[in-house]
Amino acid sequence: MSDHDHHNDDNPGVSRRRVLECMTWAGTGVLWTISGGVPRSLGLVGSAQAAEPAGLTFLQISDSHVGFDKPANPNALGTLEEAINKIKSMPIKPSFMIHTGDVTHLSKAAEFDNAERIISQAKLDVHYVPGEHDFLDEDVKFYRERYGSGAKGAGWYSFDANGVHFIGLVNVVDLKAAGLGNLGAEQLEWLEQDLKGRSKSTPIVVFAHIPLWTVYPEWGWGTEDGARALDYLKGFGSVTVLNGHIHQVMQKVEGNVTFHTARSTAFPQPVPGTAPSPGPMKVADDKLRGLLGVASINFKQGEQRLAIIDTPLQG
Amino acid sequence: MTFATLRRLGIRIAVAALLTSQMPAAHCAETTITIDNFTFTPAQLTVKVGDTVTWKNHDDIPHTVVSAGKFRSKTMDTDDSYSFTFTAAGEYKYFCSLHPHMTGMVKVE
């Protein structure tokens, strides 16, 4: 993987066709790794987990939508608990967890309480970013009270772990009519400062709720000013962008940047363009757990790409 | 239907007629805009000053309706609704603040 030549990364010669070629509509339970910009499947989750990874391993969970009880999944709290149980039984204990938003469905205090009660059973530090479903209470205070300490603005922040710089961004506030996700000028300015003077060899992981790349604008799946954030990340040898919101695994590689979206622990959403709209997708009961899950991300020192394993709750 | 029921109904109609006759504007129609599949239907609606428009969410996902500086609903969960009475003419563009690709317009004449 280290044969990836990031000196070429400044070359904007990644054509649209090339990007589309690199876009992977990932299946379930497959370890994806990237070599020379091309995603490559290494095998099924079972065998991938058997090989003990070195370096930093952390988990991503997303879109737990605690409180959701509609036909697509009448018990979203139950499937969150299944995901946490899966995490507890992982052979290698991850360093920490990130949650890429929509912790709750309607931002009710009881929903946040229930989410905390279940997620804390993993006994891992959790770094949160909010989804649009986490800011629905009248005073927009429940999320901030729980997870906002030490964060700037609507909840953005950065931290370091094992030589990797992590940046949690908020792109779900102050959305404009007919627009997409939004970072806003203040956050972008903070991001620019946060990255200034940092060694270009520092691996960067950016996480936010709505995809920072344009997945499907017709359904609002993208971030209006995401490209500006990515501009600041140009020149860094290894950038990994982790998002949620779309409740399905999607991966793309563009130059030095790997984009990845995680499954929800609550309910699936349709593949773009295959339904009249996004939203909770009802599938046969025995199919649901194959479409929900968590992601495990491993970073080995000296490698350009982080290995991402998506594990469904079942199947 | 019993006589008592008919009588109550009759009184209600009489009261309603009385109230209507005392209203200054002739128009006080109520119109519903439905939200299905992340779409406002109808997307464009023309009403008269004094009319009330009610948005009703049929999706399994919450939505809002926001018209900058004019009106802003609370979050509407499934089957929740929000009503707004238009007291001034104009074009009211609005959107869902959670899913901003959802847009609509109410024209008030």
Image (tube, rainbow, N blue to C red):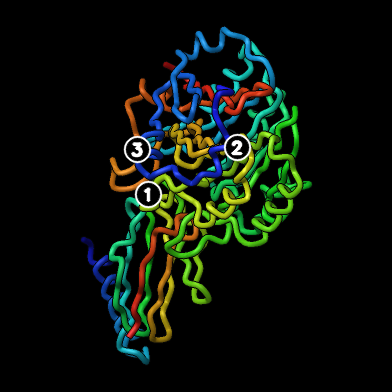
Q: Is residue A100 above or below residue A288?
A: below
What secondary structure is marked by label 3?
A: loop
Residue pictured at 58% horizontal, 37% vertical: A7
**Where does label 2 land, which residue?**
A239
Q: Please state which of the two labelled residues, at mark 2 or mark 3, is closer to the viewer.
A: 2
Mark-to-mark CA distance, 2 and 3: 25 Å
User: Residue A180, how many percent across, how many down?
Assistant: 47, 56
Indicate which disc residue B59 carries: 1
Amino acid type at mark 3:
Val
Residue pictured at 61% horizontal, 14% vertical: A90
**Which chain does the numbered disc 3 sit on?**
A
User: Residue A75, how many percent across, how many down?
Assistant: 48, 31
Indicate which disc residue A276 carries: none
Mark-to-mark CA distance, 3 and 1: 18 Å
Amino acid type at mark 2:
Val
Spot the residue most to the right.
A150
Quadrant of the image containing the C terminus of chain B? bottom left
- The answer to whether the residue labelled 2 contacts the one labelled 1, judged by CB atoms less than 8 Å apart, is no
